[in-house]
Amino acid sequence: MTQAIAPRARTLVLLFLAAVAALLVGAGPAAAHAALTGSDPAQGTVVDTAPTQVSLTFSEKVATTDGSLRVLDPKGKRVDTGKPANVSGTTYAVQLHAGLPDGTYTVTYQVVSEDSHPVSGAYTFSIGAPSRTSVPVSGQEVGGGVVGGLYGFGRYLSYAGYIVLVGGAAFVLACWPRGTSVRAVQRLVVSGWLALTAATLSLLLLRGSYTGSGKVADIFDLDLLGDVLQTKTGAALVSRLLLLAAAALFIAVLFGAYDKRDDEEKRDLTFGLAIGGAVVAAGLAASWAMAEHASTGLQPGIAMPVDVLHLFAVATWLGGLATLLVALYRAPADQPVEASAVRRFSTVAFGSVVALVATGTYQSWRQLGSWSAFTDTRYGQLLLVKIGLVALLVGVASISRRWTGRLAGTGAPGSRATVAAGVGAGVGAGTTASAGSGGAGKDPGSGTGTGTGTGTEQSKKQGAGKQGAARAGAGRGSGEKPGDAATGAVGSERAAQLARQRAAEDTARQKRLRDADPHRFGLRRSVLAEAGVAVVLLAVTTALTSTEPGRTEQDAKAATAASSSSSSSGTGSSSGALTLDMPFDAGGTNGKGVVSVDLDPARAGGNEMHVYVTRPNGRAFDVPEVKVALTLESKSIGPLPVAPDHITTGHWSASGVQIPMAGEWKIAVTVRTSDIDQVTVSKNAQIG
């Protein structure tokens, strides 16, 4: 039977790995969950005198270290004094050395958001006048590379382990108490515990490098591990390990003392064991809620219990589904999963889906905040994919429910009594000729089981006779004939060969019995399809938990726009400066973003122009080409072309841009994002 199931198991494992690989390759570095919403000096500004400090404001509180906020001069030398300080709320500042010369300075930051994800980025500002800088701004993102991939896989494995552990235990307690004696089910639940434990230990080791240097060599740095243990995420992982020790005790009782009780005693123990298991399962789920999305942002006091309930509902549904799949394929013929157990699981799964929809609706509102975020943010797009997969899973589950209804009929194929009778009939039909002759003299209506038993006994006697003869041949003294020992060895080998053949026949017979039941066969296929969709759904969910929430992304955009508007009014920077922000969408990959044009002093005569290209979340990125054209339509002047020079990532600059006269000028920017994708956006502005 094991050999027959192996191809299907391999297929499911390959699907699992393919889904993980697709998401890990496509995800890239971890998305920032705390967005930079403001800075002083602001991005791209030119200040007259050197500031005494640089401050950054984020959308939520962040964790910082000595190197979290650095300021580099044009030659790449640090000019800050050390560890940043939290000056107010979500604003962090680092002091600068006195007497800084003119030029363009680069600010880099690498912090950890309150929901445990690393955040990094960079921008430039200038003192006196812009200059060239040797500091590369690209490559500042953290959470990628080999360490990022391993960390992402560890998170997936931890979710999968939790689902299998909790869902498997819930299935046997609530739906199929007899399943505690099925070895395949025991192995599945224990595998879930092992996977969750191994993943948790791996995440602890990887955490320091993941949020820091990203180097593989730092994985086993004990100093970094000590720092991790002082963080909220480290405390959550340690708590999870302690709860896993309690979970190990629960598993030992479930498959030990509980399994040895009869059905009546099991009913008395089930309630207490279920309460204890639910407490451990809720504690494990809370280890995610206390350190990730639910622990920060809007209504954390409500969001954390909802997150625990959501994860518990997912585990009960998908973990129970995995256990049912194993039971349908791997349970022995004399211990089949009963139709009543499948019906009970159908009810439990329906309740889990209802809880899942209710908690998921709240989480979606909390993380998105608007309908537009469904399509305008990566979080919303992934959420749409998840909703589609859940709908597909529910559709396949409805097919399984119909097969379950067909199993429920009295005497229907697949009931326990029918399967037991089928085993007897199948053995009678599949015995050897000598076994069949044992029942040949019986009345046809007297019961196949009797003939089967007689024939089987004859087979056993014949086999015993052969084995006895072989032993006798082997036991005669060596003085009788030289070939007697060899003959005995041949007889023993022949007896072992016959035993293996009979075992193979029994295995094939059991498979034929299962496949001959059309209702159970249909249920197995539909449950296998459910499990395949569930594997992909879990991968999408894991990617979703490491993606910046749509509400945070949109709030950061609004804050950036407000900051730019303030800058354009001339407050906080050199007088007369003008800033224009223009969203663009050129189509294709990386086709969306915002282009900002800074013009200083924004009056007739010579001007300094800076052009910045950022993603919708405010992060700077490069495009192949940026061109600017100025037109004064009221005087039919222009377009006057400007070709700015590339300075650093997402930053272009042009000196001595001549504005002939004051008026309302149209400033058009052409952004080319690929060889074939480009777009021109424009705004009117009063200059002079």
Image (cartoon, grey):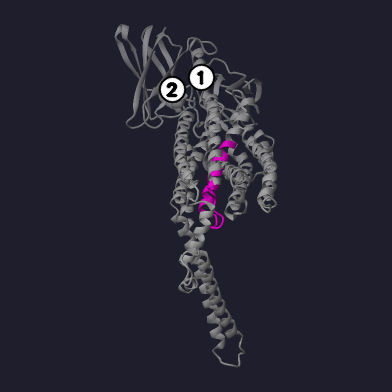
Residue occupied by mark 2: 594
Q: Which amino acid does label 1 sit on?
A: Thr
Q: Does dot 2 land on a helix, a strand or a loop? A: strand
Give the crowd class for mark 1: few <14, some 14-19, many >=20 residues within 10 Å.
many
Q: Does dot 1 land on a helix, a strand or a loop? A: helix
Q: Is residue 283 magenta?
A: no
Asked if the residue at tag 2 contacts the one at tag 1, i.e. Cβ–Cβ closer than 8 Å, the answer is: yes
Q: Residue 472 placed where, x, y %?
A: 59, 84
Dot 1 or dot 2, earlier in sequence = 1
The image quadrant of residue 227 is top right
Q: Is residue 326 magenta?
A: yes
**Is 250 on the left-hand or right-hand side of 593?**
right
Q: In which quarter of the image is the C terminus?
A: top left
- The residue at 51%/15% (across/down) is 562
Which circle marks residue 140 in the picture? none
- Bounds of the magenta span? 312-339
Q: From this view, report whether residue 11 is shown above or below residue 303.
A: below
- The answer to whether one can see residue 10 in this image is yes
- The residue at 49%/32% (across/down) is 138
Residue occupied by mark 1: 560
- The residue at 55%/35% (across/down) is 351
Q: From this view, report whether residue 157 is shown above or below residue 628.
A: below
The image quadrant of residue 173 is top right
- The answer to whether one can see residue 153 in this image is no
In this view, the residue farthest toward the left is: 636
Q: Residue 251 placed where, x, y %?
A: 66, 48
Closer-to-camera residue (58/238): 238
Closer-to-camera residue (7/343): 343
Secondary structure mostly taken by the magenta-highlighted segment of the chain:
helix
Q: Distance between the residues labelled 1 and 2?
A: 11 Å
Q: Residue 329 placed where, x, y %?
A: 50, 53
